[in-house]
Image (cartoon, grey):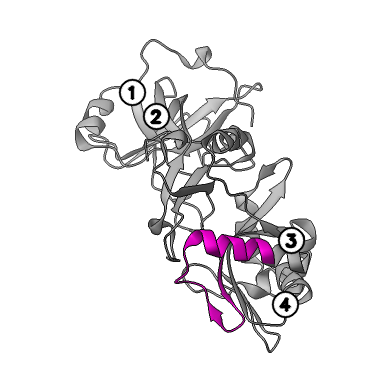
Amino acid sequence: MDRKPGARRPGQVLKPIFAGQPLARYTDGRVLLRSRKGTDMTPAFPEIRDAALAQLPDDTVFLDGELVVWESGRLAFERLQQRLARRRGTGALAAAQSWPAHLVVFDLMRQGSTDLTPWPYNRRRSALEQLFAENGLTAPLTLCPSTTDPDTAGEWLTWKAVGLEGLCLKPLQAPYRGGARAWGKYKVRVTDDAIVGAFTGPATAPRTLLLGRYDTAGRLRYIGRTTTLPRTTGTALAELLTTTDTHPWAGRTFSAGWGTREVLSVHLVRPDLVVEAEVDVARDAAGRWRHPARLHRTRPDLTPDDLTPFDP
């Protein structure tokens, strides 16, 4: 979404981007925390289950929200991945102590016997705020901020240093629609320079680039991978890349993506080509981009020594 947040359509509300994990608290005392794909995540987050039992009313309540872990002044997505890997028993309890999660709630789908999904968003939002106020809901249940004021939304975009990716736009009069595709999005994207350290795909037309930056100790740190390159772009880049067996990343393996054990097949190249890439602001604890970068252009005017040392 290329519009500035101030250019939102009339009748829309703005809120920070969160994808959504529905939470249900039933009259019989059961609690169910699900992923968007329907996976039961309740055992992996005992602190959320306990908060739902202690704080939510006895009536059935369906909430829509996003799990987050806050660590060292930032949203730590990788800690959520680690929490999900320790799904049950003592492992889940220990992980909850080490990396406690919060559920940032942004919608209310059912309250008691009333299905709220046909209601317009502004009415559901009022009911959600009332639910928080009347029941004194506190952490780890947290109310997501929401506004119709573009200036306030613009201020939220300055939070990108803590990992806020952007904003969601919801029509005030729309009924509940599950899934992020039902919302508009405004993502914060910036450009950054990096060094090509390796590539995937054929040597005659690389498919993706693995990018890095040197840190203050002179180590080439891996920071992310590009999206799939157009074939013409890959063919042109092939002439600028020189494969080598002597490389700072020799012997290292690279994951194909978050949540997968698949290992990439890569070709190491002499780390002397600088490129400019467009990235969003979501990074992990090591400073790596969580999402693929979009190659913008090569930078023949720069050498690796011209780049600011990497500082996660």
4 or 1: tag closer to the N-terminus:
4
* Residue topped by disc 1: 297
Residue numbers of the magenta segment: 108-130
- Classify 10 Å Cα crowding around label 3: few (below 14), some (14-19), many (20 and above): some
Q: If you read the primary sequence from the N terminus, does the residue marked by circle 4 or circle 2 appear first?
A: 4
Residue farthest toward the bottom in the current orientation of the protein: 28
Alpha carbon distance from label 4 to label 2: 59 Å
Q: Are marks 2 and 1 in contact (CB under 8 Å)?
A: no
- Looking at the picture, how far across and down is residue 232, in whole percent? 19, 32
Instruction: Determine the CA span between mark 4 and mark 1.
Output: 55 Å
Query: Marks 4 and 3: CB-CB under 8 Å?
Result: no
For mark 4, give the secondary structure: loop
Residue that carries the numbered disc 4 in the rendered image: 57
Residue 269, numbered circle = 2
Q: Is residue 70 above or below residue 219?
A: below
Residue bearing mark 3: 140
Q: For numbered disc 2, what is the local secondary structure?
A: loop
- Furthest toward the left, the residue is 232
